[in-house]
Amino acid sequence: MRNAFADEITKLAGCDDRVVMLSADIGNRLFDKFKAQYPDRFYNCGVAEANMISLAAGLASCGLRPVCYTIAPFVTARCFEQIRVDVCYHEMPVLIVGTGAGLSYASLGATHHSLEDLCIMRVLPGMRVVAPADAMELRSCLRAALKSENPVYLRIGKKGEPLVYPEPPPFAFGVWRELLPGARVCFLSTGNMISETLRCAEILRKHGLTPKVYSCASVKPLDEACLSGVFSQFEIIATVEEHAKLGGFGSAVAEWVADHRPSRVGCLLRFGTQDKFLHEAGEQMHARNVFGLSAEQIAESILEKLRLSEAVR
Amino acid sequence: MNSIGPWTGDYQQLERIAREIRLKLIELSCRAQSAHLAGALSCVDILVALYWGALRIDPKQPDAPSRDRLIFSKGHAISALYTVLARRGFFPEAELDRYNKAGGRLPEQPSPGCVPGVEWATGSLGHGLGVGLGMALAAKIQKRDYGVYVVLSDGECQEGSVWEAAMLAPRLRSGRLVAVVDFNKWQATARSNEVMALEPMKAKWESFGWMCREVAGHDIQELLEALRVPRPDDSPLAIVAHTVKGKGVSMMEDDNNWHYRSPTSTEVERARHELGLA
């Protein structure tokens, strides 16, 4: 995803001379083309993320469109207060891009895991939060983000993610996309878990189920029309995210259910990481397995839930 | 830009304005029962020097793209900026009477754009210099010619983010950026240099690549001379202004209780006499 980001932002900078790229010493050679084409609009702000965010807010206040780019925990948790005060309180259209989100950098240890970013970004007033499924959707999200007058947090993976879309799909804030039609079980999946969710749906089909799958890149705002529909139509609604269950996308959906009390409420299952740090070595798929986030584990949980509800009947 | 240009008048006039602003601050603190009076009093001369003698601003066009920007980073002392802005014509002086009143637009610490002339909502320390650096960089990218001035407190310089911005500014050749430290030697609960090793303050800025001038922070002429120092190599400028917390009224000077307490009406009258405004 990060190569697609570098390519797309270089193109967008060509169409909009307000775009200014800021990085916190990350992306070795990734932005060479951008730097060569727009040398006065690329700044390495050093290993100093808090200042990068304040500086971006200052740029935005003068009519520019700064894009802050570094590894997800460092561009969110590390400089949270600068985002809260300088970007959100002042309603500055700053685009914050967290790369290597979720467990993308599993092998680098929990310092580099980002399992809290959706939570702490979506709580900020005015902030929009987007987690595209793949490199194609990333391009669509990036274009929309730069047109937004709001601050936006764009949560992306690193590289080599499976493609979900053959080309950049249409994207709008607050609108989710149906990827597979189905019945009984509905997946609301976000970000880099969408391809894993599609694999899970494949497994469930072998068990005679036809789960519906939505790609929910827009984490904030939620697609409320979609939520109204699925909670009245499906037995099981499962949210899937590579993020803590506490406060993330699934929490946002649960809040919606609590607030809107749909007349017929399907059962909400939330798949995410538990309330713990990961201490062991291993790549992303290993880490997903530890947290119960592989397609097989999610499928087994869904089947177990259905078996239980049928036993009760 | 309809600016007032370099001060060519009598410095005694500016000193008189500074005394009148001090009295107003004391009256506001009494009426609103608001804290942070002493830190407001310490930066009055800095603000008078900037607003009457340095900034290219037009109160009738507070958002003009070519205006000089002043970020008042020690937002807890905002009553000083409100009073200066009102006196300079950014909004009616009568409105100061609504300072810290419920539903009014002059909160005890500023909100974004609360009144014309407030460039940034500060109050959480350590933000102003980075934001100001962004504005200075924007001037370079957009080929504009404005200056950016950031007024910081000494306690604020304990925030690491100040030094992140300080380390980047020379690399960005931010000659338009000026930091003025109101070095009143106190923070909320103790002497600032006893809490953390702030000194040597001037050497710190210089070692970070800034041109630095140390001045007597209540001498408006000296402040203006420092603000006008030529900077041929595009270095950012830091002015370390040595000040006295609570400056202007003997019972408040260098007494840190006035970080939190507000004066009684009797104390306001004493202050009025001491300031020669009775």
Image: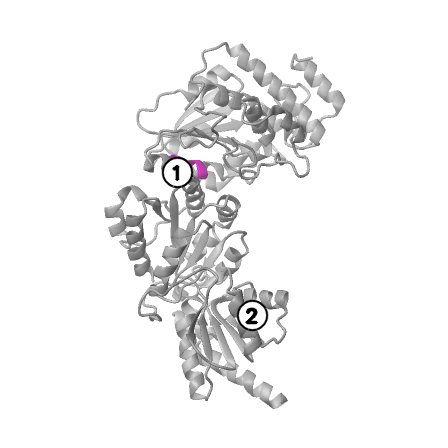
Quadrant where the image shows the N terminus of chain B: top left
Residue at image position (58%, 28%) is B82
Judge whether B96 appears above or below A313 on screen: above
Q: Amino acid at mark 1?
A: Met
In the rendered image, residue A100 lying in the magenta stretch gets the answer no
The colour mode here is: one colour
* Residue A99 in sight in this render: yes
Kindly indicate the quadrant of the structure image that contains residue B109. top right
Q: Nearer the viewer, residue A97 or A101?
A: A97
The residue where tag 2 is placed is: A228
Q: Is residue B133 magenta?
A: yes
Q: Amino acid at mark 2?
A: Ser
Assign a secondary structure to mark 1.
helix
Q: CA distance from mark 2 to mark 1?
A: 51 Å
Q: Which residues are magenta?
A: B131-136
Q: Compared to A10, does B186 lie above or below?
A: above
Residue A278 visible in the picture: no
Tell me the residue that label 1 is attached to: B167
> Could you tell me which residue is drawn at 35 percent across and 44 percent down?
A18
- Tell me which secondary structure the magenta stretch mostly adopts: helix
